[in-house]
Image (cartoon, rainbow, N blue to C red):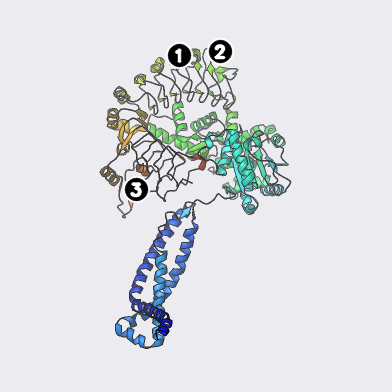
Amino acid sequence: MNCCWQVVEPCYKSALSYLCVKVGNICMLKENLVLLKSAFDELKAEKEDVVNRVNAGELKGGQRLAIVATWLSQVEIIEENTKQLMDVASARDASSQNASAVRRRLSTSGCWFSTCNLGEKVFKKLTEVKSLSGKDFQEVTEQPPPPVVEVRLCQQTVGLDTTLEKTWESLRKDENRMLGIFGMGGVGKTTLLTLINNKFVEVSDDYDVVIWVESSKDADVGKIQDAIGERLHICDNNWSTYSRGKKASEISRVLRDMKPRFVLLLDDLWEDVSLTAIGIPVLGKKYKVVFTTRSKDVCSVMRANEDIEVQCLSENDAWDLFDMKVHCDGLNEISDIAKKIVAKCCGLPLALEVIRKTMASKSTVIQWRRALDTLESYRSEMKGTEKGIFQVLKLSYDYLKTKNAKCFLYCALFPKAYYIKQDELVEYWIGEGFIDEKDGRERAKDRGYEIIDNLVGAGLLLESNKKVYMHDMIRDMALWIVSEFRDGERYVVKTDAGLSQLPDVTDWTTVTKMSLFNNEIKNIPDDPEFPDQTNLVTLFLQNNRLVDIVGKFFLVMSTLVVLDLSWNFQITELPKGISALVSLRLLNLSGTSIKHLPEGLGVLSKLIHLNLESTSNLRSVGLISELQKLQVLRFYGSAAALDCCLLKILEQLKGLQLLTVTVNNDSVLEEFLGSTRLAGMTQGIYLEGLKVSFAAIGTLSSLHKLEMVNCDITESGTEWEGKRRDQYSPSTSSSEITPSNPWFKDLSAVVINSCIHLKDLTWLMYAANLESLSVESSPKMTELINKEKAQGVGVDPFQELQVLRLHYLKELGSIYGSQVSFPKLKLNKVDIENCPNLHQRPL
């Protein structure tokens, strides 16, 4: 008997256990259904949160993580199965309300097994739902790998189809490794190259990477290497320290070993450039190099396998391009005149675009006929030449108001392809007297921005990120206009020319504006060629190597209105002869090493703008007390810090309207912030060795740039909450939180250095227009934005950030959790060094 039991016992126990589980599932069915519904609702809410985060990340260019995509797929499947199961359970719920019903089902084998099966399914589904819940994904999206081709925006084109087809056919030939595209300025070479770039999308599987590089007149190898390095994502923290040879080695290594099937598109070569010096491996058989240039000779020197000329548009194509934008067909007489005007543009797309913008607002036959008469007055032998094109482009200039025309020509003083900050350009115009500031500086600046809008609208300036620049042909046309003495003006422009001395000028008395921007000039000696008096009004000498300027040079320039000597680091003093510049209105000495302001400065009674920023050796600016017409004073980052005496001088300068300052004394800062007038006009403040609260700095309503060095930046919880309540108030129309009086609304640049007690910079949440952030040597900083403090603010930080520098922050662990994105930040503008705990990096 015992022997039989030993055999039966395991089977008995197994059956009993099985039966207990089955009965348990039946008895717990109701309770498990409640638990399943609760767990299912939690899982759906969790899924909704994850989907919202994924959508937000994908909207900013991210791609969902594989683990998240798998989880969402599993949730979708279980979601459908659980709904079906709960529907079945609900249909039987009425019969499972009491114990007698359970007993009746147990007495019927079919019903018993059905209920048992349902109970088992509910229990199993509950287990599955619970296993998918509570994942708590820290990250749901990631930066996708760079695409093979970055598609570039391109306007609708006319007349390029045949050239594009020919170029593409040539490029796809295996034996053609290098292709040169040439043609006159403004003919559409860049547009053609853009179309080629975008066509590589169709064959992206055949290539590893397509690289676009904008070259320039000087064909700077270093700049080309930086552009390639950024595209290849090899611009790490050490990139900026590499020599050109080291950069070339890195580029060559990646292209040779990892991306041998590369395409390099070089736009706007003015001269030949060594591909080997850049780091382009030209021994393989899978690469392609395409470049554009104005000169066919460059194609020969670069040894292109084939040269393709971009020709001007045919008469019909030119008319189609013009009429597509202006729509002249409905007015027969105007249409006839318009076709004659189009013919004068010689099929050059740039000329057609500029003239189109000029004539778009002209609605009468008289206006159109006057334009045609102007174009027909030009010499016919110039047609088709560069000067002939200048004459056509000049029509747009001729239609400008006198003030706008002066402002346009002024832009030609800056180097080729130079991006001019709009606010700085307007300051120059005000300094020149082009814009009257009698109604206040802000109104004058508004008028300056209106002029910029008009010039952009006329096609004479191009706009990019609060900066403007000139198309090469437009700049050449402007220089052609001012190259000869006319209307009392003549320019001499020798920028980036490698000059070591002043240029030879036949007649100094005819020159009104001279730009020697970006040269190697070291001194200005006495020159017997100098006349007793010049008519020079504007002199740009910034970014040279000046050391000495002789007194006579200033003595003959009493007409000088604008003098820019900025970023000549070796200038330590200016001669007393500066007192002869009695007409001077704008003087820029930023970035020089001057130790004292020249004694003659005080007699410059017309001076309205004085820039002394980044003058690290300057000890005092007390002489400004005599400059009663001064409107703009800048000494941000200067060794000449604000003190009580200088504060009183500033208060007495009644015309002062714009200020940047350096402060290194706590009591002076307190007194300065207490001056509503001075604090309200301050656009830049450099603080050193101070104890300061972010809330106090927030009262500077016009602040554009801020630097704090060795400061103890304080804040209290009550201060933060109180200020946040002041900052954001409920909207009258809804419960939405909206800014009422935002702090730091104009703040664009912040530098933090050696602030040893600083833990975070959460107050930067309010700097919606922040473009540049540098934080260095702040050992207690653990995060840039604290999530708890940031709750309820309702804005995403760093949406405009373009430059980020983080150095020697040993405790920094995060920037802003997993939520931050940097839509405008570029890889070569990120510099992170010695931040060992920062594992989540931008981009």
Indicate which disc residue 527 carries.
Answer: 2
Task: Confirm whether residue 781 shows in the render.
Answer: yes
Choose between 45 and 237: the one closer to the eye.
237
Task: Tell me the crowding category of disc 3: few under 14, some 14 to 19, or many 20 or more residues within 10 angstroms, Cα based.
Answer: some
On the rendered structure, is 345 left or right of 54?
right
Choose between 788 and 703: the one closer to the eye.
788
Question: Where does the image place residue 486, in percent across and percent down from the top left?
Answer: 57, 25
Task: Confirm whether residue 395 shows in the render.
Answer: no
The residue pinned by badge 1 equals 577
Q: Disc 2, disc 3: CB below 8 Å?
A: no
Choose between 430 and 579: the one closer to the eye.
579
Choose between 434 and 609: the one closer to the eye.
609
Question: Where does the image place residue 660, in percent across and percent down from the top left?
Answer: 37, 30
Note whether 38 is above or below 545 in the view shown.
below
Task: Tell me the crowding category of disc 1: few under 14, some 14 to 19, or many 20 or more residues within 10 angstroms, Cα based.
Answer: some
Kind of residue sitting beneath label 3 = Ala
Question: Where does the image place residue 74, in percent across and percent down from the top left?
Answer: 47, 65
Helix, strand or loop at mark 2: loop
Q: Please, which residue is most extreme toward the bottom here?
A: 108
Q: CA distance from mark 2 to mark 3?
A: 64 Å
Residue plotted at (39% across, 39% down): 746
Q: Nearer the viewer, mark 1 or mark 3?
A: 3
Helix, strand or loop at mark 3: helix
Kind of residue sitting beneath label 2 = Asp
Chain-order first, disc 1 or disc 3: 1
Residue plotted at (70% across, 32% down): 381
Chain-order first, disc 2 or disc 1: 2
Question: Where does the image place residue 231, in percent across and percent down from the top left?
Answer: 56, 44
Kind of residue sitting beneath label 1 = Gly
